[in-house]
Image: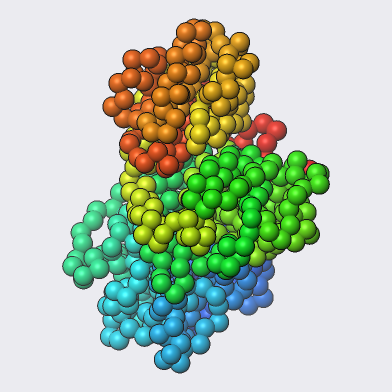
């Protein structure tokens, strides 16, 4: 996600903004910009790429003034270009804004503003917000922001600087982080604590639904109705590294806990399709294309491949289309049977995985239309694709993929609904019912993560095992593969994921009292069969760790250890069953003293063959 910083005080704001933004660099970004109030005028500088490009342009002509706002952008609406970089001006250029988040109804708002004669210079939702706010500002900047936000749906943390109110900046927050820093000769607002630590340790956390006015003497807070809010500041004792990780020991743990949030970000604006645009208009697959294709081919590697296997089950079930899921590194060196009638869907967190990008080029060369599910806007894969469904997970820094996986699943589920409706195998009501099921996903995942202490304790008994077996069936067989991959990657323990029913055809020979067997057994679907497999493993002396539905007595009686997950429709169980497996791998690796965020021999983005 983007990083934002603002400051009001004595001395050069630009220097403070750049220092703050530099502390947010670790999160990843593709462009940056600052705005400073200089002699009642707002000066803006923006550039694509790294902060040093912005610094170079500032060297030529320094900005003076103690009030400013800055931004590092992780593209979501519109490509990573200078025009799309923040800050954005309003129509009259009286104010500038930086924004983190997604404005759900920006197209609707933009249409209205265009009808009133507004011209826009970027493809962003944020510029629309800048124009909207400027139009609402009369005698007081904060009142104007409050008025404008009444019309806005979505998630945001914003900072607004207006030349008519030169001694302050106004910030607001809804579903996107914002924190205030109280320094000696300046006050700050930022999306994350690391941006503030060089200047102050005295901070004040902003809550959802609050609007702030920051001056060099401090901050005043009100809610969205204008009611004053009282809040004491607190002292942060974290060091910089801890702050970057949000107080967690590792990025992986932080990202595991970010999943419920990432899921709700990925759902923003996608749950209530408009009658004109339908579901997922960004995919640009015309209904005729969906109707005329005869098969789907999913291309991906690693964790993204596992997401693809679950996507296959959903698409086959809802759209009645045969789906092949190909490991990209294999596919690209074969003579694949794809053509114009094959819808190719690439899945990649980075969008730069060489095998996936190359496999897609093989497919498109044969005439297959290519769509992708990707986390990084402007990446090679998205440039090659006719349509992209962005996962909106935000930057994933830990090498072991976690939040990218669950948001990929979400996109694939939405895609399956869309294809099902387009092809007439789901009627619109069934499509809507399935979308409705997703509304509770965030809270259900939050409940699943509450098992963390239990999982931490369980890891104590198993962290020295040399081998693990993971078993699952149906939708939870790919989860077994993913659980095993997580453990291998970060703890260096050999682990194998297997379809539970296939165990008796070979791997059962491996089981003895030294082999922990992780069985994924939520209720519904092939539950009874999985229970049979669990008993087989137990009968061979295996130590069974079962992932089961909360309150399941049958599993509790048969397994050595259980990790409950909350009840959810069977179709959606992968969203919750994967969470304990991520945590189990994490805590086992932690006890083994492994380098969790950067495991040996691995790279976050594999751009070689
Ligand atoms: C996941 O934990 C891995 N680090 C790895 O398997 C990864 O999923 C794979 O390299 C594909 O990456 P991508 O999603 O960026 O294409």
Q: Residue at x 64, y 52 (%)?
A: 295
Relative to 221, 400 lies left or right:
right
Quadrant showing the C terminus: top right
Give the camera-side residue of 415 and 296. Answer: 296
Residue sitting at the far left: 227
Quick check: 560 above or below 590?
A: above
Give the camera-side residue of 9 and 84. Answer: 84
Relative to 304, 354 lies left or right:
right
Q: Quadrant of residue 282?
A: bottom right
Quick check: 146 above or below 401?
A: below
Q: Position of residue 517 (x, y in %)?
A: 50, 18
- Ligand 1 positioned in quadrant: top right
Whether residue 461 is visible:
no
Give the camera-side residue of 201 and 599. Answer: 599
Give the camera-side residue of 324 and 98. Answer: 324
Q: Position of residue 175 (x, y in %)?
A: 36, 58
Q: Residue at x 50, y 13 (%)?
A: 537
- Total marks placed: 0
Q: Residue at x 81, y 47 (%)?
A: 335
Quick check: 30 above or below 401?
A: below
Residue sitting at the far bottom: 117
Q: Position of residue 393 (x, y in %)?
A: 50, 52
Q: Residue at x 50, y 30 (%)?
A: 473
Whether residue 292 is visible:
yes
- The type of colouring in the image is rainbow
Q: Position of residue 10 (x, y in %)?
A: 43, 69
């Amino acid at each position: 996600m983007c990083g934002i910083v603002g400051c009001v005080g004595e001395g050069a704001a630009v220097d403070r903004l750049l220092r703050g933004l530099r502390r947010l660099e670790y999160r990843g970004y593709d462009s940056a910009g600052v705005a400073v109030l200089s002699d009642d005028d707002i000066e803006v500088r923006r550039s694509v790429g790294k902060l040093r490009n912005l610094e170079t342009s500032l060297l030529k002509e320094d900005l003076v003034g103690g009030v400013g706002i800055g931004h590092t952008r992780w593209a979501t609406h519109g490509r990573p270009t200078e025009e799309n970089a923040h800050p954005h001006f309003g129509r009259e250029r009286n104010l500038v804004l930086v924004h983190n988040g997604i404005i759900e109804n920006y197209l609707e708002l933009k249409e209205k503003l265009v009808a009133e004669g507004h011209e826009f210079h970027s493809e962003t939702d944020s510029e629309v917000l800048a124009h909207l706010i400027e139009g609402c500002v009369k005698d007081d900047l904060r009142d104007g922001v409050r008025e404008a936000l009444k019309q806005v749906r979505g998630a945001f943390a914003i900072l607004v600087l207006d030349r008519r109110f030169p001694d302050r900046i106004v910030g607001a927050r809804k579903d996107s982080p914002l924190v205030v820093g109280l320094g000696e000769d300046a006050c700050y607002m930022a999306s994350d604590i690391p941006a503030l630590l060089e200047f102050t340790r005295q901070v004040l956390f902003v809550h959802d639904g609050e609007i702030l006015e920051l001056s060099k003497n401090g901050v005043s807070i009100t809610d969205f109705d204008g009611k004053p809010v009282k809040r004491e500041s607190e002292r942060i004792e974290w060091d910089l590294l801890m702050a970057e990780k949000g107080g967690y020991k590792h990025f992986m743990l932080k990202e595991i806990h970010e999943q419920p949030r990432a899921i709700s970000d990925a759902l923003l604006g996608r749950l209530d399709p408009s009658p004109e645009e339908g579901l997922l208009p960004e995919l640009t697959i015309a209904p005729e294309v969906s109707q005329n294709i005869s098969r789907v081919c999913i291309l991906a590697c690693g964790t993204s491949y596992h997401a693809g296997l679950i996507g296959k089950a959903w698409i086959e079930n809802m759209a009645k289309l045969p789906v092949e899921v190909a490991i990209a590194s294999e596919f690209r060196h074969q003579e694949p049977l794809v053509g114009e009638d094959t819808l190719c869907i690439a899945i990649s967190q980075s969008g730069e995985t060489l095998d996936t990008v190359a496999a897609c080029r093989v497919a498109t060369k044969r005439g297959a239309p290519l769509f992708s599910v990707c986390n990084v806007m402007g990446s090679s894969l998205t440039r090659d694709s006719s349509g992209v469904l962005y996962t909106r997970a935000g930057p994933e820094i830990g090498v072991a993929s976690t939040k990218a996986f669950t948001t990929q699943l979400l996109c694939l589920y939405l895609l399956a609904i869309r294809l099902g409706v387009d092809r007439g195998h789901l009627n619109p009501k069934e499509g809507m019912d399935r979308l409705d099921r997703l509304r509770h996903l965030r809270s259900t995942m939050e409940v699943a993560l509450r098992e963390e202490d239990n999982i931490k304790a369980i890891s104590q008994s198993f962290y020295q095992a040399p081998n693990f077996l993971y078993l699952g069936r149906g939708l939870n067989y790919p989860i077994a593969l993913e659980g095993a991959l997580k453990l291998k990657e970060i703890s260096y323990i050999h682990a194998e994921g297997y379809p539970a029913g296939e165990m008796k055809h070979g791997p059962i020979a491996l089981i003895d009292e030294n082999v922990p067997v992780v069985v994924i057994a939520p209720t519904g679907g092939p539950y009874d069969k999985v229970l049979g497999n669990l008993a087989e493993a137990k009968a061979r002396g295996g130590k069974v760790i079962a992932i089961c539905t909360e309150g399941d007595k049958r599993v509790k009686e048969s397994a050595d250890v259980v990790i409950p997950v909350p009840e959810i429709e069977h179709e959606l169980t992968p969203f919750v069953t994967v969470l304990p497996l991520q945590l189990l791998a994490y805590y086992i690796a932690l006890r083994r003293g492994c380098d969790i965020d950067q495991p040996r021999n691995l790279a976050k983005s594999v751009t070689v063959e």
